[in-house]
Every structure is written in structure tokens, then in C-alpha cells.
Image (tube, rainbow, N blue to C red):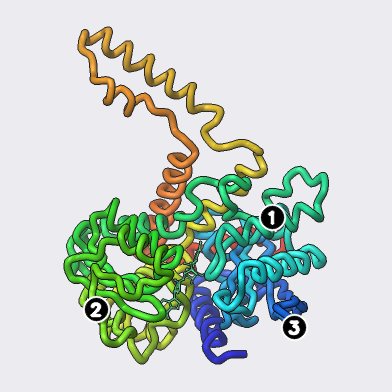
Amino acid sequence: MSKLSSSFYTTVQRNFDNAAALTDHPKGLLAQIRECNAVYQMRFPVKIGNTYEVIEAYRVQHSQHRQPTKGGIRYSAMVDQEEVMALASLMTFKCAIVDVPFGGAKGGIKISPRKYSVDELQKITRRYTVELIKKGFIGPSVDVPAPDYGTGEREMAWILDTYQTFSRGEIDAVGCVTGKPVSQNGIRGRTEATGRGVYYGLREACSHEDDMKEIGLTKGIAGKRIVVQGFGNVGTYSASISQDEGDAIIVGIAEWNVTLYNPDGIDIAKLIKYKKKKGSILGFPGAKALKDKDEWVSIDCDILIPAALENQITSKNARKIKAKIIAEAANGPITAGGEAILNKKGLMILPDMYLNAGGVTVSYFEWLKNLSHMRFGRMEKRFNQNTYANIIGTVEKLTEKSISAKEKRLITRGADEIDLVRSGLEETMVMAYKNIRDIKKRRRKITDLRTAAFISALDKVANDYIAMGVFP
Ligand code: NAD
């Protein structure tokens, strides 16, 4: 077991214990919520080239108090049991915070995807899915995976196809996995969901003048200087949406091989195109490459968004941070030692289990779409359009004034699936933040948003167990 991930799990459990100590829930109930309910560790052979490789993989269901359980699948050479346990635990709390009715789970395959061809990745993914099917660890009402670090809609399509091969006649089979391509029963807005959620969460946090004043910032996300570590799915969308919709300035982007810096702002759309063409952000002409790639941490900025992996901000580099807000787009990016330093400095930390919950929120919408077998907006879009057009027509008649065709089109537009997904996500992120902020404001002993978020989650999960009659 690697030292690194073991400390990630320890950090999650320590944070849980700190919050649990501030609640009145019975000890047995807290112990039940704290531990992982089921851990499936597997080894299977896959033919790679001329030899067989034995692949190490996991699926952990942290809590089955609500079913199905839900959580992404990670492909990384650093995967091990404790890492997956930590991520599965966070999923339970994440779902509770945003009122998504799932228990938490997570999967991981210990491979570096860059070292395998697409065909080999497909073989590994399909074999992993078969292992999950054999043990009943996947299914629309049991356990529903999704993308995470190193995986995306391509892998989800392979999982779906494999599951369907073994589930002839199961009418809801397409709900066995989320984050699928739209053409394969996915939902519009899922790929961007985590990054978009990060933006909504940040925008909400920055909208409270008194909170901003406390950390020496002005109200509003517009004009805030942001650094993002990790330019994959979550980092890319966090950066582009903050820039395009929030008018924030992205002054730094860090990847595993380089950190880019431009105090006037990096054009994120151009950087995305560049990365697609070259396969890396290295050599991008719109910013300068810092001499030391690890210096992303000390760039002068207002907001730092770690969006790569756990354990990136530690007791070794936390003192260098100049940002006033750390927005945890990644899971577990701050170690306990790092957090102690940041709390002393009086920074605001937007915790992972709240801030990156946009992915699971839209996964929930996708799962609902799959179970209802219909695209969102299909029933009501035209009806709403006609109703709005009638209202405008009546107002025009009564006032004897008319509005332009362009204005009319805007006002009478009915909502498409993407509009509904985005508004559902925005509502979820805004309401969850208000709830966490309220908990922090109401209870004097709570001085940070992470503890407040844990308490929000803990209370909800505890109430579920009590309602089930498990803990009278
Ligand atoms: P991804 O694989 O799409 O992207 C990760 C990026 O980080 C890659 O570009 C990689 O090169 C980069 N990276 C790796 N090591 C780095 C380093 N040392 N410094 C800088 N960059 C580095 O993964 P993702 O889906 O964007 O996930 C990122 C984080 O967000 C993970 O912690 C994941 O658990 C979390 N998360 C993802 C989702 C989701 O929907 N994908 C949802 C919630 C949370």
C-alpha cells in the first residue's frame, strides 16, 4: 500500500472524525457511516502484445444506505485499495450534500492509460466490467459507475456495451453507467458538468461581500485571477467557463510536464485547441513556461483550483500559496498538514465533496433520463413555446406595441435538454452552498467550510439510517 494514498484515506477519516465530534449522533451510527461497506479487490489477466499482464483493480461501495451506489472509475498507476476507499467515502458525503439519492462508491484500475493502445484499453475495460457483473457490482439499481481521472465517455460506452451483452431483456440496462456519449444514451452537459459545477460554486462563494471582505477580496468572480492545476476534463471546463461566463482571468495553467503563466490572462479556447493538436500544453505560444513546473503553487493569484489529483498541497508547499481561495476541483488535493497551514493563514477552502459534485449531479439526471427512456424537455418544450407566444401576443394586443422578432424568439424559447441540465445543476450548487454556509455561520465551533460540509452530509446520512429503523 503506498504511503501517499494511505494518507489520503487517513485525511478523509480524520476530517470525518473532526466533524462527527461536533454532532450528537450515537457512536455506533457514526462508525457505520464512517466505514466502507464492501471492498472488491480483483486481479485478472489481459493479453497485451505477446504476453499476459495481470491487472489489479477495485470497486468499493462505501455506503448502501441509498441505492444504487454511485462513483467514477479511475485509471492511474497510483490506484490502490486505500485510494479507492477514500474516493468512495467522499462520494457518499458528496451525494448527500447535493441531495442526490445514491450511496457512495468508486472504482479504480491500476494502469497508466498512456502506456496502452486504444484496443488494449478496451480489452481491460471490458474485462473489468465482466468482473463487476460476475460479482453483482454493477447495474442500474445496484451500482452505477461514471468517468473519473483517466477515463471518459469512450470507456463508459465500452462498459455499457459489455453490460448489455450480459443483460438481454433488462429494460433499464442503459442506466448501468453514466457519462456515456450522448448518442449512447448519455445526457447533454455531462462532460462539462464537474467544471461547470466548480464555476457555479466559486461564483456563489464570491457573491457574499462579507465573506470576501474577511479574506481580503472584493465581491464577485469577475476580474479574479485564477490558477488551475491539471488541464484534463475538470480543469479545462473549470477554466473555460470561469473565463467565458464569469469574466475571470486565468493567469496560470499547470500540467504534469509544464506550468504556463501569463499575468494578462491565457486564452483558454486557444490552449484547448493547441492541446488537442499537440497532445500537450508544452510549447503553447500564448504564455511563458515557468522554469520550475512545481511553481504553480506560488503564482500570484486570487483563486487556486487544484484539478489533478490528491495530495498536491502539502506541509511542504502550502506556505508558498498566495491565493485567498482554494477551490478543490480534484478530490483530496490538500493533505492534513497542508490544510493546517492554510487554515492558519485564514484562506477560504471550498471543499471537494461540495465543489466537484456537479459531475454526480448531472450523472443523476442522466440516470433519471435512462430510467424514463425520454430526453428532458421533449414533452413540454413546444407547449411552453406556444404558451409564451400567446402571452406575448396578448400583451402586444393590449398595449398596441410590438417587440422585435429577435426579442420574441428569446422570450418564447422553450427549454432544451441542455438548458434544463444547466439550470438543474446551477440550482443544486447554489442551494448546497447556502446550506453549508448557513451551518458554518450558525455554529460557532465550526470555523471552516469542510467541517460544515461534512456535518451537512453526516446529518442527512444519519437521518436515512434512523428512518430505515437501523438505529432507533
Ligand atoms: P483527467 O484525467 O481528465 O485530467 C487530469 C489531468 O491532470 C490530466 O490532464 C493530467 O495530465 C493532469 N495531471 C496529472 N498529474 C499532474 C500533476 N502532477 N500536475 C499537473 N497536472 C497533472 O481527470 P479529471 O476527470 O479531470 O479528474 C481530475 C480530478 O477531478 C480528480 O481528482 C477526480 O477524482 C476529480 N473529479 C472528476 C470528476 C469527473 O467528472 N471527471 C468528478 C468529480 C471529481
Q: In this rendering, would 18 be left or right of 465? A: left
- On screen, residue 110 above or below 88: below
Foreground residue among 10 and 83? 83
Which residue is at a point 64% across and 44% down the rendered structure image?
A: 370
Question: What amino acid is found at the position of numbered circle 2 in the picture?
Answer: Ile
Disc with the residue nearer the chain's start (3 vs 1):
3
Question: What amino acid is found at the position of numbered circle 1 in the picture?
Answer: Leu
Local crowd at mark 1 within 10 Å, few (<14), some, or many (≥20)? many
* Percent coordinates x, y for residue 161 in the rendering: 71, 54
Instruction: State the separation of the CA atoms marked 3 and 1.
Output: 27 Å
Which residue is at a point 43% across and 69% down the rendered structure image?
A: 279
* Percent coordinates x, y for residue 37 in the rendering: 70, 72
Q: Which mark is residue 51?
A: 3
Query: Which quadrant of the structure image shows residue 378?
Result: top right
Instruction: State the separation of the CA atoms marked 3 and 2.
Output: 46 Å
Q: Is residue 24 visible?
A: no
Q: Which residue is mark 2?
A: 299
Query: Which quadrant of the structure image shows residue 95?
Result: bottom right
Q: Which residue is mark 1?
A: 160
Front label number (3 vs 1): 3
Which residue is at a point 57% across and 57% down the rendered structure image?
A: 153
* Percent coordinates x, y for residue 350 in the rendering: 37, 68
Question: What amino acid is found at the position of numbered circle 3 in the picture?
Answer: Thr
Q: In this rendering, would 311 be left or right of 9? A: left
Front label number (1 vs 2): 1
